[in-house]
Amino acid sequence: MKLSREIIATEDKRKLQDISGEEVLSCYQCGKCSAGCAMTSAMDLLPHQVIRLLQLGQVEDALRSQTIWVCASCLACSTRCPRGMSLPNVMESLRSTFLRPGDRCLNPADIPYELLEILPEQALVAAFRKYT
Amino acid sequence: MKIGVFVCHCGLNIGGVVDIPGVMEEISRHDNPGFVTDYRYMCSDPGQMRIKDAIRDMSLDSVVVAACSPAMHETTFRRTVEAAGLNPFRCEIANIREQCSWPHRDEPEKATEKALEIIRASVEKVRKNQALSPLSVPVTGEALVIGAGIAGMQAALDIADAGCEVTLVERLPYIGGHMAQLSETFPTLDCSQCILTPKSSEVGSHPKIDLFTNSEIHAVSGYVGNFDVTIRRKATYVNWDVCNGCGLCMEKCPQKIESGFELGLATTKAISIAFPQAVPNRPVINPEACRHFTQGKCGVCEKVCPVGAINFEQEDTFIDRKVGAVVVATGYDLHPKTEVGEYGYGVFSDVIDGLEFERLNSASGPTQGEIRRPSDGKTPKEVVFIQCVGSRDQENGYPYCSKICCMYTAKHARLYKHKVPDGQPYVFYMDIRAGGKGYEEFVQRATEEEGVLYLRGRVSRVFEEDGKITVFGVDTLSNKKVEIRADMVVLATAIVPSRGQTELCRLLKISTDEWGFLSEAHPKLRPVESLTRGIYIAGCAQAPKDIPDSVTQAGSAAAKVLALFSSDTLSHSPEIAVVDEELCTGCGLCVEACAYDARTLDIRRRLAVVNEVLCEGCGACQVACPSGATCQRNMELSQVMSMIDAVI
Amino acid sequence: MVYSYFPGCTLRAKAKGFDSSALASCKVLGVYLEELEEWQCCGATFPLQIDNSFPLVSPARTLAAAKKAGRKLTTLCSACYNVLKRTNHVLREDLDKRNKVCTFIEEDYFGDLEILHLLEILRDEIGFASLAEKIVKPFSGFPVAAYYGCLLLRPPEEVGFDDPEAPRILEDLLFALGCSPVDHPYKTECCGSYVVLQPGEPTASPSRLIVESAKSRGARAIVTSCPLCQFNLDYVQSGDVERGENAVPVVYFTQLLAMALGFGEEVLQFDGHLVPPGPVFRSAGVGGCEGAT
C-alpha cells in the first residue's frame, strides 16, 4: 500500500463523511464493534477493518468489501463504541456511494416466489431501502 | 516617570506570531515610556540581567514585562526588579502569550494589535502603581494529612521525621489503604504486606504522628499557615484505650456480615478487625449489622470482653486542630463493575475486578492465596483479563487512561500462571503502557516466558452459559473474532476518585477536574500544590498512579510542607482589597461577593472589614461595592480607567 | 384510555395476528387503540445518511397527522416504533432537518408528540400487576424466552425505554402472564434483519444461535415484538418442522396476552407462522388455546 497526502485525504473520503456525518479518524481501532457484531461470519472484513481502510484513504477497497452489504444496521456496535462513532452510518455511506449513481444490487425479480409468499412486508421495504 | 518595557519573544511562542519590532516601535513612539527593549527569553539569566541593567543605567521607576502569564513568571520578574533596587510592585506583567499569541496564532496581525493594547494598558497601570510591602502571616508548624493509604502514610512520615507534628486522618478503621489489599506488587513481585507493614507500624507508633482512624474531616476554616480543622471521630463502640486487641469479641459475635476488606469474597463479624495485621489492631462494631443496634438484644461481645472495652453508648467525638498545611491523599476507588452493562452488571459471580483478584491471590485472603473462582471454589483453567473497562471510554465511562491497569494485569496474569501452571491466561488490551523502570521487561516476561496470551482488541460482551463465562472479543492483529469460554474473567475497571472526595474538596475549597481528581496548581511545574496555598496533594487523589509514583509525590508534598514550615512567618501579597472608611456605608454587599470569606461586617462601626490574609485580591468586592469604598491596591478605579483609555 | 394507533404495513398483511390480538386484548384491558385516519409506511428502516432527509418524509407525515389527532401515539411493530421515535427525535433536535421536511410536507410539526410502544402502555399506564389480575388463562409456569432484537433497544438515548444490555420489560410481562421467563444471552443480539434478502450468496443467519440458545435453556416458545424477528427466527426453523424435529414457536407478545385473556384462534391468527404454535401450547395445556391450530 502506498500512502501520500493525496491518497489519505481523497475527495471520496470527504463525500463519505458528508453522507455519514462521522469522522473515521475518531476510531482508535479497539475492535469492540467487531467483537460484538452478530453478522461477522458472512463478512470478508471485520467492521473495524473497514474503518481502518477509510482512515488510510483506501475507499475502493472498502467499497469492494462484502461487509458493507452484510451489516444489518443493528447498532450493537455504535451503542458500545467507546469513541461514540456510528459505524452503521459509515456502512450506509459506503452503500450509498455504490447505489446513488443508480446501481442496484437487489432485483425484485430475483426474489424467489416461495420467499415472497411468506416474507413480512417490513423485510421487503427495508431491503429495498438498503440494496437499491 | 520612566517606565521600562521589556518584550519577551518566548522563542517562537510570542515572536513567531506577534510582530515584536513593530510593537516596540509603536510603544516607543506613542506611549512615552523611558525605555523599550526585547529579548528571546526574558526569564533566562541574561534576560533578567537586561532588566536589572536597564533599571540601574536608565534610572527606571517602573517596569512592564510583556511575556507569558503572571501565573508563570510574575514572581520571577518582581524578584528581578527588587534585586535592582525597585519596589517589586512597580513591576507589571503584560500577558501576551496565553492571552494573545497562543489563542490568536492564526491571525498574526490581529495578535500584534492585541499585544500592543495589552502592553499599553499595563504601561498605564504601572504608572500609578504604589510601592507596597508584603504582609506577614504567622505559620503553625503542624500538618494535617488526610488519607492514610501509601501516599498519606509516606507524606506523614516524611513530615514527622523532619520533626514536625502531623495529624493523620483516615476514614477507615485501619491504615494502608488499597495497598493493604494487594497481594504482590509490580515490577518486583514483592509482597505488598511485607513492604507495607513496617511502614504501617511506624506510622502507628511515631511520636510525632497523631493518628485518627475511623475519622473524617468535619470542618475546615482559615488559611495557609493557620487552618482550623475539626475532625469527626466516628463511634467504634469499643474503647480503644482499654481494648487489648485479644479478638475474643470477634470470635463470639453471632452476626456474620460480608467483609468490606475482602470485597465480599469472605465474611466477617459485626464486630471486627479488618485484617490480622491492621493498624491500629482494634475492633469496630458495625451498627448497621450488630444485633444490639438492629434488634435491641445480644451484647455477647460486651459479656465476653475481658477488659470491659465495649461501649454501646459511645458517640462520635469532635476534635479541633490548628495546622499550617494540609496534604490531601484520599486515594481512589474502582469504577463499579455493577455499572458495566455489557460485562454483566456485576451479576456473574465469576466476573471479578482487579482488587478482588488481589484478594483471591493474597496469602491472607479468603482462599489463602489459592486461585479459586468465587462461584464454586474450583480452580479456573481459562482466565480472561480485560483491560480498559471504563477507562479510555469517553462514551460509557471515562476518557482518561487509568495508567496502572496494564501493569497490574500483566502481574495478575503472571501470578495466576505461577499458581496454576496448566492454566491459560488471556489478556485483552488496546495498547500496553509499560513506561516505568523495569516495567516493559516485566510485561515481556509475561508474554515470552510465562505463556500469557495477549490479544489486541476490546471485548464486546461477557455472559454466563453452562457454568462458563463466554467472552466475545476480537484480535485486531489477526483480524479474527475471538470467543473464549472462560472459567473466570477479571475486569481492569477504571480508577476513579475515592467516594466523598468531592465533598471534602468543598470543605477545603480546592478544585477538581471534571472527573473529580484534584487539580494541581500547574500540571508540570507545581504538580503537588493545589491552587489554594497551604494545601498539597499526593497519590491517586490527583490522578491514577502506581505505588512508586504515589510515594514520590507524597515525599514531594512533604518537602513543600516542610519548606512552608521552615520559617515562622510567611508573606502574603499586599495587592488586596482596602476599604475607605469614609465612604463605606456598611451595606454588606462585599461580604456576599467574597469567595474567600475575607470580608466581614463590623456591625458596631457599620463598616466592612478585610481579613488581609484571606483576601486573594480577586476584585469581586470592588465590583460589588456601590459606594466606591472598596478598591484593590494597585488596581484602583483611576488605574482601571487609564487602562481602558489606553486601549480604546 | 384512548391512544392513536399506527399499525404499519406488516400488521395489516403478513402479521395480522399481531394486530388482531393486540386490539382484542387492549379492549379487555380498557385501552382503546384508535387507528390514525391517514398513515403511510414508516419506511421500515431509519435513514442513516445525514445528508438525505427524504426518507424522513413518510414517518413525518404520520407524526404530523397523529399530532393533529391530539392523542399519544402507540405502535406495536418494533421497526415502526424505532423509525417513528427516531424521526420524532430528529424533528425535535435538528432545526435544519425539521425545516426541510416540514416545508416539504407543508405541515408545522415540532417533534413534540409522545410516542409509546404498547409494551410501555402495559407497563406504565396499566401496570403489570393490575394486568395480572385480569388474566383468566394463566400460563402456569410455561417457559418462554423473550427476544428483544435491536429496534426496541437501540440507540438507547433515542428509543430506549429499557436497559440496552439487560432489558426486562418482556420478562416482566411474561411473569405477569404466568409464564416462566427464560433468560438467554442472545436476547439482544441481531437476528440478521433484512439481510435475509441480501444479494448474492445467502448469509448464514444468526437466528439459529438465538433459537438454539433459548431452546437449550428450556424455552418452549419465544416472544418478540418485531415481525421481521418473528419471521427470521421462524424461518430458520422451517426445515426442523419439516423433518419433524423439535422446534419452538415464535409468537408476538400480544398473542400470549390474548391467550391469557382467553381469546381463541380467530384473534390469535397463528396460521401464517412457520412453526405452528397451536400444538405446542395445546400439548402443554396452557394459555387457553384450545381452538388454536
Image (cartoon, coloured by chain):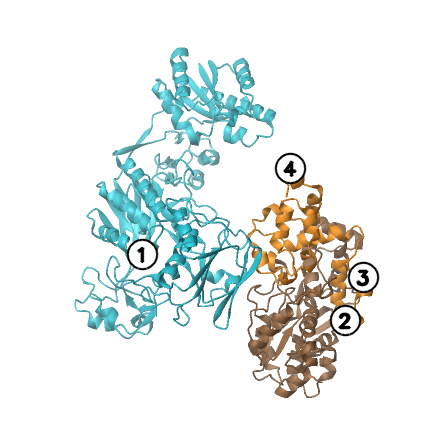
Residue B454 appears anywhere in the view: yes
Q: Residues within 10 Å of mark 3 (few under 14, many from 20)?
A: few
* Residues beneath discs 3 and 2 located on the same chain: yes
Q: Which residue is mark 2?
A: A115
Q: Which residue is mark 3?
A: A107
Name the amino acid, label 1.
Ala
Question: Marks 3 and 1: CB-CB under 8 Å?
Answer: no
Name the amino acid, label 3.
Asn
> Which one is nearer the viewer's eye here, B187 or C47?
B187
Chain label for disc 2: A
Name the amino acid, label 4.
Arg
Tell me which residue sits at (58%, 74%) in the image: C214
Q: Which residue is mark 4?
A: A5
Helix, strand or loop at label 2? It is helix
- If you read the primary sequence from the N terminus, does the residue marked by circle 2 or circle 4 appear first? 4
Helix, strand or loop at label 3? It is loop
Q: Colour of chain B?
A: cyan
Question: Marks 1 and 4: CB-CB under 8 Å?
Answer: no
Chain label for disc 1: B
Quarter residue C120 falls in: bottom right
Mark 3–mark 4 Cα distance, whole angstroms, equals: 40 Å
Q: Which residue is mark 1?
A: B180
* Residues beneath discs 2 and 1 located on the same chain: no
* Residues beneath discs 3 and 4 located on the same chain: yes
